Amino acid sequence: MFIEVDKEVFETEDESVINIRQKLFPEEEKMPLAKYFYNYPLHAPTPVEMQIINQLNPMNPEDAILPENFMDLLKPYGYDKIELGYCMFPDGSGYVATYRVRPPHISGEMERWYRNWRNLKSKSMVPGHGNLRYKIWNYADHFDHYYVNWQDGSDGIHTTESLDLGGGDRMYDTIRHQFDLEDFGLTDEKMKELKDAGCQLTGKGSYETFDEPGTHLCLSYSRPCPLGGIETRSREWIGWRPVNGKLVRDPSTKCSEEYLKKVVIHTLVEWEHLYTFLPDLYAEYHDQPADAD
């Protein structure tokens, strides 16, 4: 399903603000939640982040975690040579590395609550209008987000979004599926080592399928940041998927350096934006009924 969403450009004197956003539907405009769409500006990545993206990328593929070694991401301490970047592999598949820190004033409970709440529809949402709970996370790109079975993520999570911060690319329908990391060598001993170091992971990885041919393998986990807060290390291998305990190359997947760069920037923007409004959103909504507007 191809979604076309009207956009609008608004004036701002702050050059770091992304000043293009979707137009909300009249029904959404009436919801109390709409203030989080309008009152919290979406910002571009920091100058330091953009210097890394523009001057140190595309990274050398030799500095990337190879698809067949994707489990090497999971370690209690230490970092890869490149934690923020992207590259193409010689076979035409791609790699994305992102890194973020959840600041100390954002609790794990807040983030877990939002990860569930964004998949639920409120009582006044109209079918076909997307999900305002997801739109507030990135007003330029996000349209819809829900559990495939309408209850939990066990059967997949559906997303409709673009990646170019409102630049005009089409929105993609995506379903994120889970798989067991134990099928790829995660042992009880390794899990204990990670947990003892304060790492947070579920024993599940994920992969994405789309409204066109192609798949992405995804893996991330969190752990205490030495400077405070919680850091999350995430990777994507574009053009790969797990099948019956084996990693399989999917040559039908489209991939380019331009696309990979968009993924990196979009990811930085959405997570940094979430932390600007999440404390207020959580305080207002976490005790309300699940379908509250």
Image (tube, helix red, strand yellow):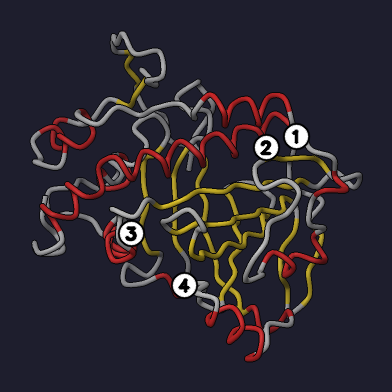
Residue pointed to by mark 4 = 155
The image quarter containing residue 87 is top right
Q: Which amino acid does label 4 sit on?
A: Asp
Q: What residue type is labelled 1?
A: Ser
Number of marks present in the image shown: 4
Please name the residue shown 34% across and 55% down the image: 104
The image quarter containing residue 116 is bottom left
Mark 4 or mark 3, which is nearer the start of the sequence? 3
How far separated are the C-alphas under marks 2 and 1?
A: 6 Å
Estimate the x, y position of residue 121 in percent, counting from the top left.
23, 56
Circle number at residue 256: 1
Q: Which amino acid does label 2 sit on?
A: Leu
Mark 3 or mark 1, which is nearer the start of the sequence? 3
Q: Judge depth for marks 2 and 1 and give the one in front.
A: 2
- Asked if 9 appears above or below 72 in the picture, the reply is above
Residue pointed to by mark 2 = 260
How far separated are the C-alphas under marks 4 and 2?
A: 27 Å
Residue 174 lies left or right of residue 37; in this view the side is right
Estimate the x, y position of residue 79 in percent, counting from the top left.
68, 56
Mark 3 or mark 2, which is nearer the start of the sequence? 3
